[in-house]
Amino acid sequence: MTMRKTMAGLLVFLCVFTVQVWAGGSKEAVPAAAKKKLVVASDATWPPMEFVNESKEIVGFGPDMLKAISEATGVEIEIRNTAWDGIFAGLASGSYDAISSSVTITEERKKVMDFTEPYTNAGQVLVVPLSSSGVTVLADLKGKRVGAQIGTTGAIEIAKVPGVTLASYDEVGLAFEDLALGRIDGVVADSPIAADFALQNPKFKDKLKIVGKPFTDEWLGLAVKKGDAETLKILNDGLARIKASGKLDEIANKWLY
C-alpha cells in the first residue's frame, strides 16, 4: 500500500514537472497578462464618454480607450453597463475588476480604491437655459435649484455653494431634461458631458448653453479595487502604450473636440 502511494506520488510529480518544463520552455508561451480577462463596469449614460447608441452598443471615449488598451496589452476586456448608484460598492465586493465611467481621481476616493494614471482632464462647468442672463458662476444661482448626478463631483461642487439647492439625479440626462423644461435652473457636469448635451444634442442645443469656464481641475482615471496591483499594472501598461503611440489623442479628438 505504501509502495502504491509512493509510486502514485512520483507519477504526479513527474506529470507536474513535465507540464512546468513544457510551459516554461516554450518560446510560444503567451504572457500571463495576455490570458487575463478584465470585466470593467461603466455607467453608459454619459455621452460622449460612455453611452448606448441606437444599435444598443456601448460606445464613446471610454469604450474606445478600453478597446485600445485591450489591443495594446492582449488582455480581453468586457464592458458591463452598471448604474452609477452602487458602482463603487460593486468594485469593492469584486463584482468586476475596474470602473471606466468618467471617475474623477480624488483624495477621498483614493482611500478606498486605487487609480491608474490619469487619462484626461474634465473640469466641471455650469449649464443654464439659453435665455438666462447675468449667470456666469454657481454663486449667481443663489436661491435656485441646480442639478447633478448623485455622487458625482458636480454634486459635491454644488453643495459647497451657500444658498444653492442641489437637485440630485440618478442619470445626468434627467437633469438636462428638467433644465430644458424649466424645472431647475442649472446643471453642473463634466465639461465633455456638458458639451455633448448642451452643444450637440438636438434636444437641447437650442435651449441650453455653457456659461463661464471649467471651475475645477479634474483628472479622470480607471478605478480598481484597493490593493489589486495586478489589474492596476495591466491598465497602466496599456495606458502608457496608447499614450506613447498617439492612440489616446486620436480617441480624444474623435469624441471630445
Image (tube, rainbow, N blue to C red):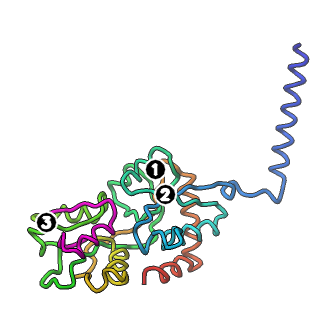
Q: Which residues are magenta?
A: 165-187
**Residue matched to label 3:** 164
Image quadrant where residue 185 sits: bottom left
> Is residue 171 found left or right of 54 in the rendered image?
left
Whole-percent x, y for residue 138 in the image? 17, 73
Mark 1 to mark 2: distance in Å? 8 Å
Whether 58 is drawn above or below 5: the answer is: below
Question: At 69% across and 55% down in the image, what residue appears?
Answer: 35
Whole-percent x, y for residue 176 in the image? 28, 72
Whether 18 is drawn above or below 107: the answer is: above
Q: Which mark is residue 71?
A: none
> Is residue 141 found left or right of 52 in the rendered image?
left
Closer to the camera in the image, 154 or 241: 154
Please report whichever mark, 1 or 3, sits nearer to the chain's N-terminal start.
Answer: 1
Image quadrant where residue 126 sits: bottom left
Image quadrant where residue 127 sits: bottom left
**Residue matched to label 1:** 91
Q: Quadrant of the N terminus?
A: top right
Closer to the camera in the image, 247 or 187: 187
Question: At 41% across and 73% down in the image, what residue appears?
Answer: 47
Q: Which mark is residue 41?
A: 2
Which structural element holds mark 3?
A: loop
Residue type pointed to by label 3: Val
Residue type pointed to by label 2: Ala
180 magenta-colored: yes
Residue type pointed to by label 1: Leu
253 magenta-colored: no
Which structural element holds mark 1?
A: helix
Please report whichever mark, 2 or 3, sits nearer to the chain's N-terminal start.
Answer: 2
Q: Quadrant of the C terminus?
A: bottom left
Please report whichever mark, 1 or 2, sits nearer to the chain's N-terminal start.
Answer: 2
